[in-house]
Amino acid sequence: MANHTAPSFWNRPSVLLAVNLVSRYLACMISFHSLQQQTPPLVIAHRGASEQAHENTREAFELAIAMEADAIECDIRRTACGELIVHHDPAVLGFTRPIALLDLAEVRRQATSAGYSIMTLAETVELCAGRIAMDVELKEPGYEERVVAAVRERFSSDTVLFKSFHDRSVARLHRIDPALHAGLLIGAPRTVALRSRPKDISLERRLTQCGATFVAPHWARLRFGFVRKMNAMGLPIIVWTVDRPAMARLLARKHVAGIVTNVPDRILPVVSS
């Protein structure tokens, strides 16, 4: 009589399949756990692969995933009906009435007439989960809890960045959960005066007061010892928006943590080499 030994738990087909799926899921996702020691820098697709497809759309995000970017960056706004959507400008292209005063159906109608589509935050989270990390920009204060809750449906804290130009949004994110990666965006300097050292001192105070865990400056800010100062504060630097390979190569040598770009397919080979 044949001796049929039952397979061990780990050798059962259903368990092997589950382990394989989880492994594939984790392999698709980079971690932001050690941003300060990130080498080479992460390549983050600015509103998706936005040179080849309309920004902040499914097409742009799918292209970024196909290009094997480390993360996609997206912008969040709230409609009049309370829906969180992915859109950069305060109004739909070609229209003037703010998205904040329109319901989702009207926003989508306007966008369709302008030749592109609108995704909700929930749809974007579903699209990216298990495939690519996220870099989420809050365009206005006031709905931080809802954004965090929506993203946490499918993402762990170490696979998503949150950022804003608004100090109070960053501070609120920090209060929601100190473990979140919450960064302060810093725009391009507009005048020579804005590039001065006193302004940098004010920036350091802002970063401390809002509890930022990383800083996201425009590339033109990286002067007057900016990188050295941020390193001294223990703050990783994620630079935007860099589309020139030569500049990306220079930034990689400065050991920035991430580079946000419209052209991830051009920047990836440069930083990886």
Image (cartoon, rainbow, N blue to C red):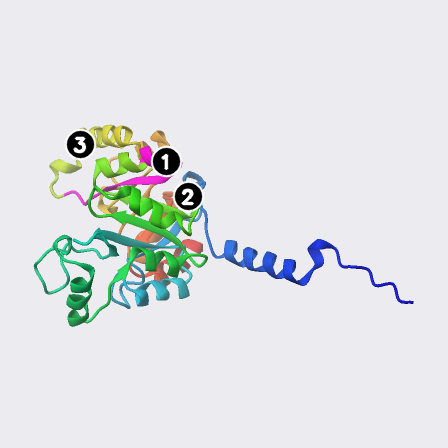
Name the foreground residue: 149 vs 129: 149
Does residue 195 sit above or below 132 in this rendering? above
Q: Earlier in the sequence, mark 1 or mark 2?
A: 2
Q: Which residue is mark 1?
A: 177
Residue 177 in the magenta stretch? The answer is yes
Q: Do the residues under discs 1 and 2 have CB atoms within 8 angstroms?
A: yes
**Distance in Å between CA atoms under marks 3 and 2:** 32 Å
**Amino acid marked by disc 1:** Asp
The stretch of residues the image draws in magenta is 174-189
**Vertical side of 135 occupied by 199: above or below:** above
Per the image, the residue denoted by label 3 is: 199
Closest to the observer, 99 or 75: 99
Residue type (three-letter) at the residue carrying disc 3: Lys
* Quarter of the rendering containing residue 116: bottom left
Secondary element under disc 2, as helix, strand or loop, is: helix
Callout 1: SS: loop
How many other residues sit within 10 Å of disc 1, few (<14), some (14-19) or many (≥20)?
A: few
Residue at 64 percent of width and 61 percent of height: 14
Mark nearest the camera among 1 and 3 is: 1
SS category of the residue bearing label 3: helix
Q: Where residue 57 sits in the image (x, y, percent)?
A: 28, 64
Disc number for residue 157: 2
Left or right: 199 as drawn, with respect to 247:
left
